[in-house]
């Protein structure tokens, strides 16, 4: 029978699915959320009411869920038997290297192949088809997944055939992303507390040696009251916990990542887990007693000044 399916139609999965379909690939899909399935169907996908129905007879499956536990739940409750023989599973969730290896072993035992293929680029990259993919797995799996990978990405890094290497590169990348994000919040909070104007501070740092991509992207949202989430505090709590876990497994010290993780946990403890990850600035505001985020009155005053 053949065919392609996706499990996981959240913020990332929806954009990836649309780009796969725009490349001319028919796609079946499943998500626990009825609303997500409806959005997928509205974009031209074939939405099914169960994961087993979505993957039945398919020889290529993309899994884009949040955690290893969700990936295991999606894969190991009838799905493996429903797939076509010798199917390729693309696991694009961010998981620990040890978890990727364990999932690959179970797939192999069931007669399937896995590409350990986490992605970077966030919802913007998923929507634009410009994700960076860090992938490891058999050459056969890469060949059979080539059209799908090309549809969702601007760059595919082939990192050998050992499962877990894609996850390793992604986890190390998330150390940089998380530390730069929290460092951006820290400098914005510190500067504001010391009397700097936040917008002027951002302009200076973003055009100087302290610039980072995360600063440029997140600091403007740190000054917004309630930015639309593109990546959440909860996601970075999960990803930075994977950094700390994987570093412990490797025997590597990661004190900066551990500190960034604690600040994210603090933001989560303030009830901001589902907020945009730039909301980590709120944890710093609570510590400094000084607002970086514009108040509604400040926003209104700025609008009035510009009219």
Image: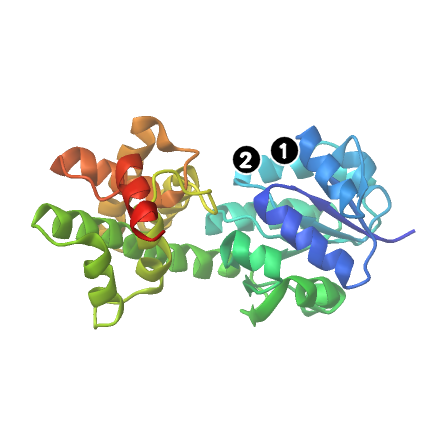
Q: Which mark is residue 73?
A: 1
Badge 2: how crowded within 10 Å, few (<14), some, or many (20+)?
Answer: few
Q: Where, by quadrant of the figure, is residue 71 drawn?
A: top right
Is mark 2 in CB contact (under 8 Å) with mark 1?
yes
Residue in the picture at 53% in, 56% down: 124
Distance CA(mark 2)–CA(mark 1): 6 Å
Residue 152: image location, x then y, percent: 65, 61
Q: Is mark 1 on a helix, strand or loop?
A: helix
Relative to residue 25, is residue 97 drawn left or right?
left
Q: What element carries label 2?
A: helix
Relative to residue 37, is residue 233 drawn left or right?
left
Of 189 and 6, nearer the camera is 189
Q: Residue 38 carries which label?
A: none
Residue 166: image location, x then y, percent: 52, 60
Tally the marks: 2
Q: Which mark is residue 69?
A: 2
Residue in the picture at 69% in, 64% down: 151
- The answer, for residue 245, to whether it is visible in the render is no
Residue in the picture at 58% in, 35% down: 70
Residue 21: image location, x then y, percent: 77, 56
Q: Looking at this view, name the residue that lies furthest to the left.
A: 194
């Amino acid at each position: 029978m053949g065919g392609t399916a996706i499990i996981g139609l959240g913020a990332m999965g929806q954009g990836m699915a649309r780009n796969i379909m725009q490349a001319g690939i028919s796609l079946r899909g499943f998500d626990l959320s009825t609303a997500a399935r409806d959005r997928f169907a509205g974009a031209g996908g074939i939405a099914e009411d169960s994961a087993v129905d979505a993957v039945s007879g398919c020889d290529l499956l993309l899994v884009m869920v949040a955690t290893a536990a969700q990936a295991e739940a999606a894969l190991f409750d009838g799905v493996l038997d429903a797939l076509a023989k010798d199917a390729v599973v693309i696991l694009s969730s961010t998981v620990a290297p040890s978890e990727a290896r364990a999932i690959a072993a179970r797939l192999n035992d069931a007669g399937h192949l896995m590409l350990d293929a986490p992605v970077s680029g966030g919802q913007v990259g998923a929507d634009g088809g410009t994700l960076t993919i860090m992938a490891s797995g058999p050459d056969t799996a890469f060949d059979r997944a080539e059209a799908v990978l090309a549809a969702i990405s601007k760059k595919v890094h082939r990192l050998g055939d050992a499962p877990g290497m894609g996850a390793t590169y992604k986890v190390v990348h998330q150390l940089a992303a998380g530390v730069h994000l929290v460092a951006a919040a820290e400098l914005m909070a510190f500067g504001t507390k010391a009397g700097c104007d936040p917008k002027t501070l951002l302009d200076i740092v973003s055009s100087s040696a302290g610039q980072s991509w995360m600063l440029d992207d997140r600091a403007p949202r740190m000054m917004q009251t309630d930015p639309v989430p593109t990546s959440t505090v909860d996601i970075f709590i999960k990803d930075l916990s994977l950094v700390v876990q994987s570093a412990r497994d490797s025997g590597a010290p990661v004190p900066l990542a551990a500190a960034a993780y604690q600040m994210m946990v603090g933001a989560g403890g303030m009830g901001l887990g589902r907020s945009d990850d730039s909301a980590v600035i709120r944890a710093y505001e609570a510590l400094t007693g000084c607002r970086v985020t514009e108040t509604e009155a400040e926003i209104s005053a700025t609008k009035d000044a510009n009219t």
